Amino acid sequence: MSNRILVTPPGPKAKAILERDSKVLSPSYARDYGFVMDHGKGAQVWDVDGNRYVDFCAGIAVNATGHAHPEIVKAIQDQAEKYIHISSDFYHELMVRVAERINEIAPMQEDVTVFLANSGTESVEAALKLARYATGRRQFIGFLGAFHGRSMGSLSFTASKARQQERFFPTMPGVWHVPFPDPYRPLFPIPQNGDEGDAVVNYIENILFATALPPDEVAAILVEPIQGEGGYIVPPKNFFPRLRALCDKHGILLISDEVQAGVGRTGKWWAIQHDQVEPDIICIAKGIASGIPMGAMAARKSIGAKWKPGAHGNTYGGNPIACVSALKTLELVEREYMQNAATQGAYIFDALAEMQSRHPSIGDVRGRGLMVGVEFVADRATKEPARELRNRIIHRCFETGLLMLGCGQSTIRFCPPLMIERALVDEGLEIFERAMSEVEQN
Ligand SMILES: *Cc1c(COP(=O)(O)O)cnc(C)c1O
């Protein structure tokens, strides 16, 4: 597996494309480094200058089945020859099959109704509109550090970087942000016999509801089962059961945004299943169709069936190419890759925890399955975030043949394709540790 890096990236061909990109593409795209894709295979990608990289990003946790999986490619090709589009004003069986599949695997006992969209933010918008419609209530609770998308409704919940909000207010009114329980950086005193999850739910109940927000005006709580963009933060074990009980008590819907954590990435179909809690609505996107844009919102039938024809819709939702890609992705994830995510994820977690003992700049290692975060700190005692160091490690990985992405203040995320094999995991971890050592030393 030599010949990873032939020319220091970005090489001449990449540079030429970056130059053209900067002239015509929106400067709003936030890129950390100049990787210019040529092609990919499994969990490896090649840039336009011929450099080979191990892919620990899968886009942004999207390419569940890896790049150019032959069964996905074949499914897309076959479907393209039959028909590429018939809008959702008509019927086709693939849409039905995707919804039937989601109904089979959804984390609710009750059957679900499914709305198909084209992205994460659209699946969140659908959930918000349904929550308002079904409950007749107007207020919502979201979490600091959350990411739910960039359109005006979902953006009103997004709170992982102030830059995402800057100059866009007012967004949707009625969204109340509360802290997300972070076991590494607890904000509240931990109650006796409890954890940070109890503390946050107590805060909602005893402070927010008692002083500012009447609970019977709250339509839903929108929450990520593991915070993604916010730093791959796994909530403590009491959080979801307590949140569910709070929702039940006040007739509030619980929406689990599984856009990043769902579809097998954590080793279960849905990340909230680790907490043994049933949501009322789930939002799905990223991993579901191996990179063909698709989003989905699945709601318990007693809620979802309240919508009348025309209450919500779109042109492209349930696109046939996206549907065949989703069906094949779900089949592969079920057959093999969900288990692989659990196995390789545990292996990565252990390897990183061991690195933590050698590298004092690692403050915390956390995650589930192939959703693992490493948080960097300037000092383990003060936990001061080491943002610059984190950025330099990511950049050094890029120069030496590994694609990585940051999240949160000073975390690096590990979210490779779910199909990644052990040899590439080892190769990637080795590049990562070497990059970390080099950056730590100067
Ligand atoms: C990425 C993401 C979204 C938004 O998805 P887009 O497809 O970019 O609109 C929503 N929620 C979560 C948890 C995400 O990670």
Image (spheres, grey):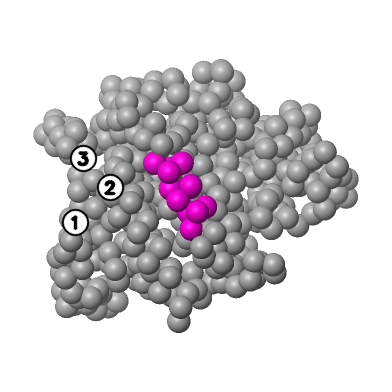
Q: Helix or strand or loop: what does disc 1 sit on?
A: loop
| Residue found at x 48% / y 47% | 350
Q: CA distance from mark 2 to mark 3?
A: 18 Å
* Residues shaded magenta: 344-355
Q: Amino acid at mark 1?
A: Met
Q: CA distance from mark 2 to mark 1?
A: 10 Å
| Residue found at x 58% / y 57% | 364
Residue 148 appears at what percent x and percent y? 53, 50
Q: Amino acid at mark 3?
A: His
Q: Helix or strand or loop: what does disc 2 sit on?
A: helix
Q: Are marks 2 and 1 in contact (CB under 8 Å)?
A: yes
Towards the viewer: 113 or 191? 191
| Other-residue count near label 2 (Cα within 10 Å), few / some / many at <14 / 14–19 / ≥20 | few
Residue that label 1 marks: 1
Q: Nearer the viewer, mark 2 or mark 3?
A: 2
The disc, 2 or 3, on the residue closer to the chain's N-terminal end is: 3
Residue that label 3 marks: 69
The disc, 2 or 1, on the residue closer to the chain's N-terminal end is: 1
Q: Helix or strand or loop: what does disc 3 sit on?
A: loop
